[in-house]
Image (tube, rainbow, N blue to C red):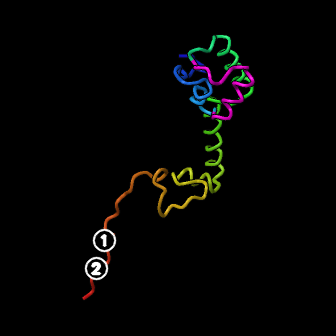
Amino acid sequence: MPRILGVDIPAERKAVVSLTYLYGVGPQTARELCHKAGIDGTVRARDLSEDEVARLAALLDKDYVVEGQLRRQVTQNISRLRDIGCYRGLRHRHGLPVRGQRTKTNARTRKGPKKTVAGKKGVKDLR
């Protein structure tokens, strides 16, 4: 298994797909990387030479913000929003959707599982 920036990339997949296992590298960036490094993206990751892996790692280190550095940057941005007390920061603090999504329904990913509230039965018959 080739190792780039401390991450084992899958050896059985094509180089372009394997690079997307790095945090912050999507399909488009992976294609760009292979093109800049002069590597055929269709070759399997296990068939990459040490020199090619080193070129990829050098390009990633020099031109892109990925892995630990990107995670730190995202965390710092969120903590900055929380500290200044802006609307988005408050949404992060309360664990609610940040980008304007509805919360009456369909916010289960951010809000977590439903919390049942007592006394919410249906309307009873009035005779």
Label 1: which secondary element: loop
69 above or below 105? Answer: above
Q: Which mark is residue 82?
A: none
Confirm whether the magenta stretch covers residue 28.
yes
Do the residues under discs 2 and 1 have CB atoms within 8 angstroms? yes
Of the residues shown, which amino acid type is indicated by label 2? Answer: Lys
Specify the quadrant of the image occupied by residue 91: bottom right
Residue at left offset 52%, top offset 21% = 12
The quadrant of the image that shows the C terminus is: bottom left
From this view, report whether residue 80 is shown above or below residue 34.
below
Residue annotated with mark 2: 124
What residue is shown with label 1?
Answer: 121
Give the x, y percent position of residue 2: 57, 16
Residue 107's x, y, as percent? 49, 56
Q: Residues within 10 Å of mark 1 (few under 14, many from 20)?
A: few
Q: Which residues are magenta?
A: 26-45
Q: Residue at x 56, y 29 (%)?
A: 21
Q: Main secondary structure of the magenta part?
A: helix
Is residue 120 among what the camera can see? yes
Q: Residue at left 68%, top 11%?
A: 51
Give the residue type that dot 1 points to.
Lys
Measuring from the top left, give residue 114's x and y in whole percent: 38, 56
Q: In 3D space, how far apart are the residues under numbered discs 2 and 1 (Cα atoms)?
A: 8 Å
Q: Is residue 72 visible?
A: no
Q: Is 21 situated left or right of 118 in this image?
A: right
Q: Furthest-bottom residue in view?
A: 127
Report the residue that reaches farthest toward the left: 127
